[in-house]
Amino acid sequence: MQQKKKTFGKNTRQHILFLHVLFTALWIGAGLSMQLVMFLKNPQNISELFAFNMSVKIIDDFIIIASGMGTLLTGLLLSWKTHWGFFKHWWIAVKLILTALVIVTGMAFLGPWTNATVSLVETIGNGVRENAEYLNAQF
C-alpha cells in the first residue's frame, strides 16, 4: 500500500507562500537599495565614504542575508510539502537553482568584498581612494 504524501493545508500553504513572496520582495528591494547607494555615492570626505560603505554592509548583513535565506527555505518548504514538488514544473527547478547560485555567489564574493571595503576605509583612511584593493572591491 502506497502512503499518501503529507501536504500542507490551504491556510498553512497560504501563510508560507505569503512569507516566500515577502522574503523575495525584501531581497530584491534590499539589493536594489544597495546598488543605488553604491552607484549614487559622492562622498566629500572620508567620514561620508565610511558611512556609504557601512550602509551597504548593514543592508547586506541584516536584510540581504536574512531575506535570501528566508526565500530559499520557504521555497524549499513549499516544494517539499505541496503538490508542486521540486520538478513538476520546470520554473520551480530553475528558481531553486538560481536562488542557490545567487546565495553562493553572495557568500563567496559580494559579502567579502563589502566587508573588505569597510575594513579598508577604517584602516587606510583618506588614501583608500587610490588603493587598488579598495578599487577592485568596488562593484
Image: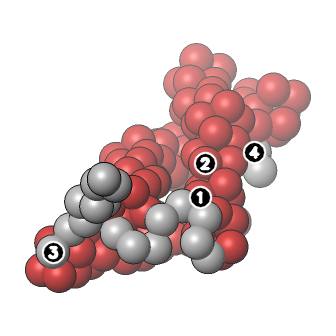
Res 125 quadrant in image:
top right
Residue 48 to residue 7: above or below: above
As helix, strand or loop, the secondary structure at mark 1 comes to helix
Residue topped by disc 1: 96
Amino acid type at mark 3: Gly
Secondary element under disc 4, as helix, strand or loop, is: loop
Disc 2: CA contacts within 10 A as few (<14), some (14-19) or many (>=20): some
At horizontal 61% and vertical 64% (from top left) the residue drawn is: 87
Residue 100's tag is 2
The reply to whether residue 40 is visible in this rendering is no
Which residue does the image show at 87% across and 28% down from the upper left? Answer: 132
Looking at the image, residue 95 lies above or below residue 131: below
Mark 1 residue type: Leu
N-terminal of the pair, mark 3 or mark 2, is 3
- Tell me which residue sits at (31%, 59%) in the image: 5
Mark 4 highlights which residue? 138
Q: Position of residue 2 (x, y in %)?
A: 34, 55
Marks 1 and 3, Cα distance to the nearest angstrom? Answer: 23 Å
| Mark with earlier residue (2, 4) | 2
Measure the C-alpha gap from mark 4 to mark 3.
47 Å
Hey, what amino acid is under mark 2? Ala
When asked about the image quadrant of residue 31, the answer is: bottom right
Q: Is residue 74 left or right of residue 88?
A: left
Nearer to us of marks 1 and 4 is 1
Category of crowding for the residue at label 3, using alpha-carbon neighbours closer than 10 angstroms: few (below 14), some (14–19), many (at least 20): few
In this view, the residue in front, 115 or 127, is 115
For marks 4 and 3, the one nearer the N-term is: 3
Q: What mark, if any, has residue 9 been given in the picture?
A: 3
Which residue does the image show at 67% across and 31% down from the upper left?
108
Q: Residue 78, image x and y in percent?
A: 36, 65
Q: Say left or right for 2 vs 110.
A: left
